[in-house]
Amino acid sequence: MQTLLLKADNPADVETAARILRGGGLVGMPTETVYGLAANALDAEAVAKIFVAKGRPQDNPLIVHISQWEQIFPLVRRVPESAKKLAGAYWPGPMTMVLEKSGRIPDVTSAGLPTVGIRFPSHPAARALISAAGVPVAAPSANISGFPSTTTAEHVMRDMGGKIDAVLDGGPCGVGVESTIVTLASDPPRLLRPGGVTLEQLRAVLGRVDVDGAVMNPLPKGARPLSPGMKYKHYSPKANVIILNGSERAYLDYVNAHREPGVAALCYRGEEKALRVPAVCYGAETDCREQARELFEALRRLDDIGAKTVYARCPEPRGVGLAVYNRLMRAAGFEVVSVG
Ligand code: AMP
Ligand code: MG
């Protein structure tokens, strides 16, 4: 299959992408979080193709994207007050709400769960594409399952070229990590995945929000997580990532003492000057939003330069730092070394 490269700033290209979706095809879609691999959420056959293209396990549900608030009503059994409040505060934006699904959502989309994740993205190209398609759009991240998510059209082409109908190029993603997922199907609400809308922001609207154990910790063997995606090795480059926990000085000393072929650093901007191994920076130490935006690109670059072992800096799990921490910990398979 030849994958068309379309431009989000060209209305005729957006219409072409919409036609592909209506016809049951797959489109790489820019959003403010990461690129999504989009299909008509109500078309079971089209959705099944997403799982094949990504190599995604069948039990990992997809998020359904809408382009207007009213589109939520036929998709869920009920819209609770809490959902209205959250939507009022953070939609359109990088937040997914899990609610009890209606009969309109095919089982393949929700991976057999009685619930469905709904998101109203803010990216103008995503909104234009979903509106033009005229259907809600199921879209997981547009990467090969298990690898870092894609934040540019070029990354999507590299992972998905030849396997999907088109990629709509809307430029690099602004948030850079996947959406915050909060389930309103449990009481109290529970954070399943941290993202660009922070836990603190959710609590400001909802009051109590619990944090699912899978956000901070590896899953015990055989456990069934609330968010099935948490079960899998995730966001991983080919290199073995190890997080070094400690001061900047201790980090730099440790990495320079472990200078060997294949060793590389994933560091904050400016630290590369003091490192004697190949280094990829992912933002300033004090700016977690910048770290989130650059993390996946940085992980991909480490593979491009042939890194085998990557020593990484990791932020404190607060604010958007919680999302960066969660992705990096999974990329590292929770391997952390204390360096003082
Ligand atoms: P991705 O689109 O690649 O970011 O993956 C979607 C994530 O959303 C996965 O981690 C899923 O487990 C999670 N998810 C989607 N729908 C639900 C749901 N109904 N309940 C819990 N988690 C969900
Ligand atoms: Mg994903």
Image: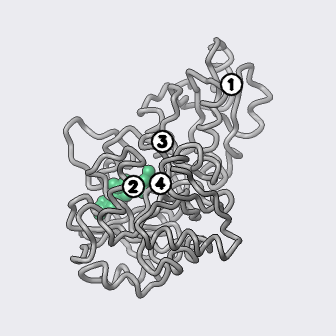
- The percent position of residue 151, horizontal first and vertical second, equals 60, 52
The residue sitting at the front extreme is 1
Inter-mark Cα distance, 1 to 2: 42 Å
Question: Is label 1 or label 3 in front?
Answer: 3
Identify the mark nearer the N-term, 3 or 2: 2
- The percent position of residue 139, horizontal first and vertical second, equals 43, 62
Inter-mark Cα distance, 3 to 2: 18 Å
Identify the mark nearer the N-term, 1 or 2: 2
- Residue 235 in view, yes or no: yes
Q: What amino acid type is highlighted by mark number 1? A: Leu
- Residue 210 in view, yes or no: no
Identify the mark nearer the N-term, 4 or 2: 2
Q: Which residue is mark 2?
A: 50
Inter-mark Cα distance, 1 to 3: 25 Å
Q: What amino acid type is highlighted by mark number 3? A: Tyr
Determine whether, in the image, residue 54 is placed left or right of residue 188: right
Question: Is label 4 or label 2 in front?
Answer: 2
Q: Which residue is mark 3?
A: 235
- Label 3 CB less than 8 angstroms from ligand 2: yes
